[in-house]
Image: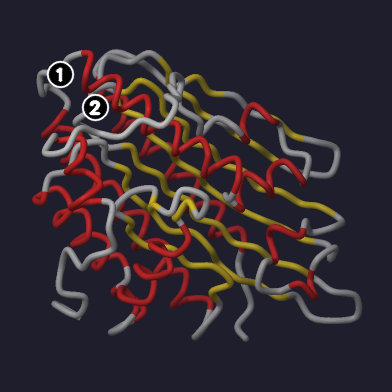
């Protein structure tokens, strides 16, 4: 297994954070990110960036962390339990956007490198992450555009990669207690270290590039769509599902809590407003019902191997 280079990953993710904040501020046109920096005695560096109350973006968080610790928390080693508790280093960027307009989708991306050093053994490394899209009102052209970029993001790993990581995303972002997906998916990967560091790092960099190209045009298309209280109510109700997933299933949230990260940063992905309604069901034939019938189902929005 080739050796990892956390310094290069740090540089890339830090630059991607700055670029992402800049383009999101430009899209909003009014609000700015609040930037903070923290360093703990163990050498962990955290740089959360949060935007709230914008004209287009109700809330966004773009958080960079370079963590070091004596004991790797269990949620970081879901597929490698033998490494739990080993000394570790983790470099990560987590990004979440909650637009104000209900016709513009919420999105999430996470990219991370873990290295762990078991007693008496050489360092072990792996990448994890991906991106996904959570619309409140579905549009076929938006779904196709998003998945075209998800497919392109997987190109460095060759044929079959997009289909593999799309399925992993559909499986992961699924609320088992509701029996429904969180959104229309994208890509999800974890414990990825093959074939070598350079190839997988290229795959991760590709995700950083295609995420912005896949998401920003969707916000530009939908941010001025007229809406009323019905759409806003449905958006806030669906955001409740987002909260449920993050607090019940999300490994990143569990990792942040168990590793002692700053809780405001760990929970920065949660939407600013949310609504739960008892036993709500969208009216048959409504645009809200169509979200469940056409969009919250696993499907191929693009040919998995086109352009591979």
Q: Position of residue 297 (x, y in %)?
A: 27, 58
Q: Secondary structure at mark 2?
A: loop
In the rendered structure, are the residues bearing label 1 and label 2 in contact, judged by CB atoms less than 8 Å apart?
yes
Distance in Å between CA atoms under marks 1 and 2:
7 Å
What number is the disc on residue 275?
none
Mark 2 nearby-residue class (10 Å; few <14, some 14–19, many ≥20)? many
- Quadrant occupied by the N terminus: bottom right
Could you say whether the residue bearing mark 1 is in a helix, strand or loop?
loop
Q: Which residue is mark 2?
A: 102
- In the picture provided, is 195 more to the left or to the right than 139? right
Please state which of residues 91 and 162 is positioned toward the viewer in this rendering.
162
The relative height of residue 194 versus residue 281 in the rendered view (above or below) is: below
Toward which corner of the image does residue 280 lie, by quadrant?
A: top left
Q: How many marks?
A: 2
Q: Nearer the viewer, residue 121 or 275?
A: 275
- Colour logic: secondary structure
**Residue 209 drawn above or below residue 287:** below
Residue labelled with disc 1: 227
Quick one: label 1, few (<14), some, or many (20+) residues within 10 Å?
A: few
Quadrant where the image shows the C terminus: bottom left
Give the mark nearest the N terminus, 1 or 2.
Answer: 2
Residue 187 at x, y percent in the picture: 37, 62
**Left or right position of 43 against 131:** right
Residue 59, compared with residue 166, is above or below; it is: above
């Amino acid at each position: 297994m080739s050796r990892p280079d956390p310094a290069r990953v740090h540089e890339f993710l830090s630059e991607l954070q700055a670029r992402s904040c800049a383009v999101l501020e430009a899209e909003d046109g009014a609000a700015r990110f609040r930037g903070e920096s923290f360093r703990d005695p163990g050498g962990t560096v955290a740089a959360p960036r949060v935007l709230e109350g914008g004209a287009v973006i109700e809330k966004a968080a773009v958080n960079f962390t370079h963590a070091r610790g004596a004991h790797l928390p269990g949620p970081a080693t879901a597929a490698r339990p033998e490494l739990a508790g080993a000394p570790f280093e983790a470099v990560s960027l987590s990004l979440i956007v909650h637009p104000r307009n209900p016709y513009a989708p919420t999105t999430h991306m996470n990219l991370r490198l873990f290295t762990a050093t078991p007693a008496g053994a050489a360092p072990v490394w792996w990448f994890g992450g991906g991106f996904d899209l959570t619309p409140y009102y579905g549009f076929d052209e938006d779904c196709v555009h998003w998945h075209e970029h998800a497919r392109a993001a997987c190109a460095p790993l060759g044929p079959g990669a997009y289909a593999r990581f799309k399925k992993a995303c559909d499986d992961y972002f699924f609320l088992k207690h509701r029996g429904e997906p969180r959104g229309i998916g994208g890509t999800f990967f974890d414990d990825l270290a093959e074939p070598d560091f350079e190839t997988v790092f290229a795959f991760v960099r590709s995700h950083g590039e295609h995420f912005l190209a896949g998401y920003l045009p969707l916000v530009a298309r939908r941010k001025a769509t007229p809406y009323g209280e019905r759409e806003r109510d449905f958006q806030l109700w669906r955001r409740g599902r987002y909260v449920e997933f993050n607090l019940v299933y999300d490994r990143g949230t569990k990792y942040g809590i168990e590793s002692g990260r700053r809780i405001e940063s760990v929970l920065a992905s949660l939407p600013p407003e949310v609504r739960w309604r008892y036993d709500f069901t969208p009216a048959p034939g409504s645009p809200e019902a169509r979200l469940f019938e056409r969009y919250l189902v696993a499907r191929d929005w693009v040919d998995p191997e086109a352009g591979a």
